[in-house]
Image: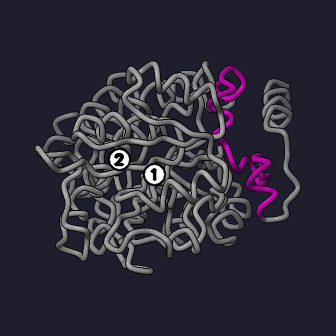
Amino acid sequence: MDIGILKEDGVNERRVALSPVGVQTLIGAGNTVYIEKQAGSSALFQDEEYRDAGALISYSAEEVITRSQIVLKVSPPTDFELSMFSQGQVLLSFLHLAVSQRRLIEILLNRRVTGISYELIENAAGVLSVLQVMSEIAGQLAVQVGAHHLQGRDGGRGILLGSVPGVPPASVVILGAGTVGRTSARVALGMGANVTVLDKEVSRLRELEHLFQWRITTAMATKPNIAKAVRFADLVVGAVLLKGEKAPHVVTETMVRDMKVGSVIVDASIDQGGCVETSRPTLIADPVFVRHGVIHYCVPNMTASVARTATAALTNALLPYLLEITEGGLVNALRNDQGLGKGVCTYDGNCTNEAVAKVFDLKPSQLSHLVSGFAKHTSN
């Protein structure tokens, strides 16, 4: 199959969809790969490496898209990129349709493009397998950037996360005990902070207490508990995730007003709308703003700040699915792998994700019926 890799906006998106090693694997399996010139340069993967891996260097996004059956991106596509897609092409990217503008899904539907969203793909165990690797990175970064902004350069409290003799450690509150929350807790503990994790599921909290040998404090994520925890927090990490849906605002503006002046919020849920009412998306080039005396870090693609690591991790997660699609064709891959199918948001002019359909008041279609019908049609 012909696979294309587009170049991202290098200022605010430094990742690339596949590393040269990933490209070499696909080509070794009999595929052709087109990659836009300097697509990997922000992650320090040079054109020569992709050329040595067997890729064909293209000099425009249009060339990549028009030559490819499958197009790979990292960030959601732009209107300009979407204007070049045609019926039957497959787009794989972080789409975040639940918090996107309506025109994105309308173009995907009108052009009958199969849109597969990385953040919705699941493995056999029901784990969001592509999103998980990004969440593991985001969890580490959340504590690192939080610690940095607490130091005082941007109005932070001027404190360390860890303690020194006679001085207590900082208080880190983590909202959500999923992959981001668990990884953030590990890093914060390693830096010597006092860590509290809140979640709605007791089983998750129990698992974390065993994992960290009761060195963390856990609490149910009720409104009173959240309000109390963030009031005394130095760093709050928002790690709330609802699969395919907009994140709920579990921290209200009133709660933010009650926080310490100079404290920091890292809203890692911002790619799904944010779990803090005062959050708004920021850019890697300008990552923070201050509201009610509290520093907010709300970068939706925060893992792009470690682009080389993130690209390698993304490649590891994507390759099995790409090989599955290219070896047996998209229809067979979707029929045989329900987890991959859960990542499909649009297919042949139909919206196939119920959560997305609900957001935009569309009638959802069952992907299994569409794929089955297509398979019967092509076999006759």
Give the alpha-carbon distance from disc 1 to disc 2, as whole Å: 8 Å
Q: Secondary structure at mark 2?
A: strand
Pinpoint residue 284: horizontal percent, then vertical percent: 30, 67
Local crowd at mark 1 within 10 Å, few (<14), some, or many (≥20)? some
* Residue in view at x 22 percent, y 40 percent: 191
**Residue range corresponding to the magenta coloring:** 332-359
Q: Which mark is residue 52?
A: none
How crowded is the residue under tag 2: few (<14 C-alpha within 10 Å), some, or many (20+)? many
According to the picture, the residue beneath numbered tag 1 turns out to be 67
Looking at the rendered structure, the kind of residue marked 1 is Arg
The part of the image, by quadrant, that contains residue 23 is: top left
**Closest to the observer, 318 or 248:** 248
State the image coordinates of residue 322 (x, y, percent, origin top left): 48, 31
Left or right side of 242 for 46: left
Q: Nearer the viewer, mark 1 or mark 2?
A: 2
Is 33 part of what is drawn in magenta?
no
Q: Mark 2 or mark 1, which is nearer the start of the sequence? A: 2
- Amino acid tagged 2: Tyr
Asked whether the beta carbons under mark 1 and mark 2 sit within 8 Å of each other, the answer is yes
